[in-house]
Amino acid sequence: MHCCDVILYVRLTNEWYAKDTSKKIRTVMKSKGEAGEHLCTNPPYGYMKDPDNRKRWIVDGEAAEVVKRIFALCLDGYGPSQIARILKEDKVITPTIHFQLKGRATRNTPPDNPYNWTGDTIADILERPEYQGHTVNFKTYKQSYKSKKTCYNPEEKWLVFENTHEAIIDADTWARVQELLKNKRRPTRTGKTNMFSGIVRCADCSEKLYYCTSKNFEARQDHFVCSTSRLKGKEICSTHFIRAVVLEQGVLARMRLTIACVR
């Protein structure tokens, strides 16, 4: 057997082994997920693994109080960016730093400022159904064993097991916060706003369209894009784009037509 043939044989063998192993792992994870076991390696901020039963989540008291405060601030009318600023000013350590102090491994690089909360972190906490005491499986997936990219499943593909661990947030508070988040108009970094921010939604996935602008943009360059494709990937919903001025002109034309019909 020639050297090239040997190399090719080894590569094919490794490829087959990796594919077969990945298939077996997916089968095991699917079985666990359908049985209601937690699929994530680490519990979300606010919970920790029970030392006596590693498959069970228990409340992490210190972090849980911060989670409760975040939800309370949202009910008081504060948006994710505002809540992040409040926690930063009050010198509340970030989840990554908290995990490190607890001796828990983290994937994120520790921030230079241990109190540097971000709006994205707050938004992620506010949107986690696990805080109601539910196990939520199959929220994400990988397209193949060759890809490291995490893709997001639509909610209808999630598998939810209720009351599997102690709740940090009650169902009423959760529902009220989700309603607020749906209708919240978050200011952009430039301070510019648009009358349709928080109102317009994607025709395909029904999620909100993000208002995008910049200090360097002319008015005609401001636009809206689908939040699903931006945050969860084009596999869930393809990118949808509409300029703010086109949207405004379209709505105005429709209003004029409606008024003319009424008259």
Image (cartoon, rainbow, N blue to C red):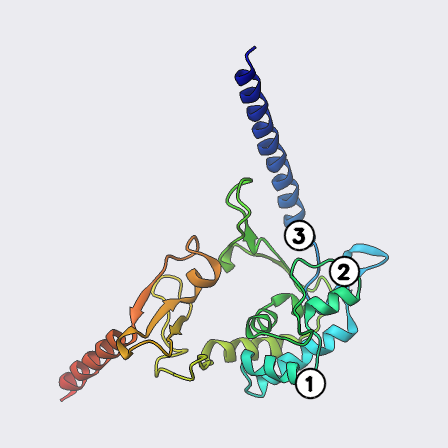
Residue drawn where x is 55% and y is 12% of the image: 2
| Cβ–Cβ under 8 Å for marks 2 and 1 | no
Q: Earlier in the sequence, mark 2 or mark 1?
A: 1
Q: Which of marks 3 and 2 is nearer the N terminus?
A: 3
Q: Which of 122 and 64 is in front in this view?
A: 122
Q: Mark 3 points at which residue?
A: 39
Residue drawn where x is 77% and y is 69% of the image: 60
Mark 2 Cα-neighbour bin, 10 Å: few <14, some 14–19, many ≥20: few
Task: Using the numbered discs, state the Cα–Cα distance from disc 2 to disc 1 in whole angstroms.
Answer: 24 Å
Going by the image, does 154 lie left or right of 206? right
The image quarter containing residue 114 is: bottom right
The percent position of residue 181, horizontal first and vertical second, equals 51, 77
The answer to whether residue 166 of the structure is visible from this angle is no
Q: Mark 1 points at which residue?
A: 90
Amino acid type of disc 1? Asp
Quadrant including the N terminus? top right
Q: Nearer the viewer, residue 164 or 59?
A: 59
| Cβ–Cβ under 8 Å for marks 3 and 1 | no
Helix, strand or loop at mark 2: loop
Amino acid type of disc 3? Leu
The percent position of residue 260, horizontal first and vertical second, equals 13, 85
Helix, strand or loop at mark 3: loop
The percent position of residue 34, horizontal first and vertical second, equals 63, 49
Helix, strand or loop at mark 1: loop
Q: Nearer the viewer, residue 254 or 7?
A: 7
Q: Is residue 6 above or below residue 250?
A: above
Task: Using the numbered discs, state the Cα–Cα distance from disc 3 to disc 2 in whole angstroms.
Answer: 17 Å
Mark 1 Cα-neighbour bin, 10 Å: few <14, some 14–19, many ≥20: few
The answer to whether residue 48 of the structure is visible from this angle is yes
